[in-house]
Amino acid sequence: AKATLYATLDEKGDEAEKIFKRLLKEGLYDSVQCYHLLGDLYRNWDDYEKAEEYYQKMLVADNEKQLMNAYWKLANLYREWEKIDKAAESYAKYWELTSTRNPLADNSALWSGLAFYAEGRPDTAVYYFNQILEYFIDKNFLETALYWKAKSFQELGQQDSFENALDSLRKLDNQGYYWYKVFPVDSTVNTETVNLNTLYEKQISRIEQLPIEKDSSFFTGRGGSSDKNLI
């Protein structure tokens, strides 16, 4: 408990590091948990190489929750570090191990899709966006998954699938950021009477010209992904 407290205080981080390493050496605490805490400590210090070293050590875990947590930690680390290929594989590994009842399952499917899209593998990205649409249709990320599914089909040059995904996005009951990104409505237009079918037809040609996000800035960085611990 003392070491965990120090880990939250920048000025005591060096002392926490010594305590965690002593616990490891003397076998006084669960080794996987020590790897986890050391990884978090180095990540907070932006020492990504050290953080990776200790998160990877967590992969020796025979406890499924600890193993899942290791992949989740690695995935978020690689996303911050802009190692997109490794992030994609780690999020996908988490998805393989999780169940749809896990509160982070939809996060892992979505981030897997975004990672593979950012890596330039839109065909694989579509698979993960479809997992959102199949298993989490009544939860978060439905709009996000449909938008990026459409963008993936755009990059693949599959026009019919691209338009079908946009049509599904158009028909959503709840409209949010991505809906209005695709179907912007002029503030002077009465949204209660606007013909969305006509609006959709007008937007198809415009959406086809939207740039495919190649710089991955929509994906990398520290924000946007829950990093809660599973152990």
Image (tube, rainbow, N blue to C red):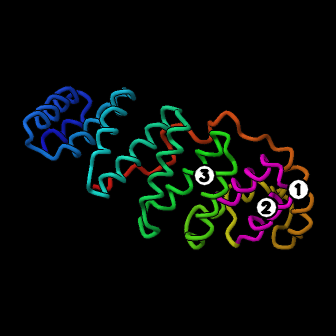
Q: Secondary structure at mark 1?
A: helix
Label 1 is placed on what type of residue?
Answer: Ile
Q: Which mark is residue 113?
A: 3
Distance in Å between CA atoms under marks 1 and 2: 8 Å
Image point 40% across, 47% down: which residue? 71
Q: Residues within 10 Å of mark 1 (few under 14, many from 20)?
A: some
Q: Secondary structure at mark 3?
A: helix
Q: Which mark is residue 204?
A: 1
Image point 51% across, 47% down: which residue? 224
Distance in Å between CA atoms under marks 2 and 3: 17 Å
- Give residue 209's position: percent from left, percent from top: 86, 44
In the image, which residues are magenta? 145-172
Tell me whether circle 1 and circle 2 mark residues in contact (CB < 8 Å). Answer: yes
User: Which residue corresponds to mark 2?
Assistant: 166
Q: Which mark is residue 131?
A: none
Measured along the vertical axis of the image, is residue 144 above or below residue 52?
below
Measured along the vertical axis of the image, is residue 154 above or below residue 52?
below
- Give residue 117's position: percent from left, percent from top: 65, 45
- The image quadrant of residue 218 is top right
Magenta: predominant secondary structure element?
Answer: helix
Q: Earlier in the sequence, mark 1 or mark 2?
A: 2
Q: Residues within 10 Å of mark 3 (few under 14, many from 20)?
A: many
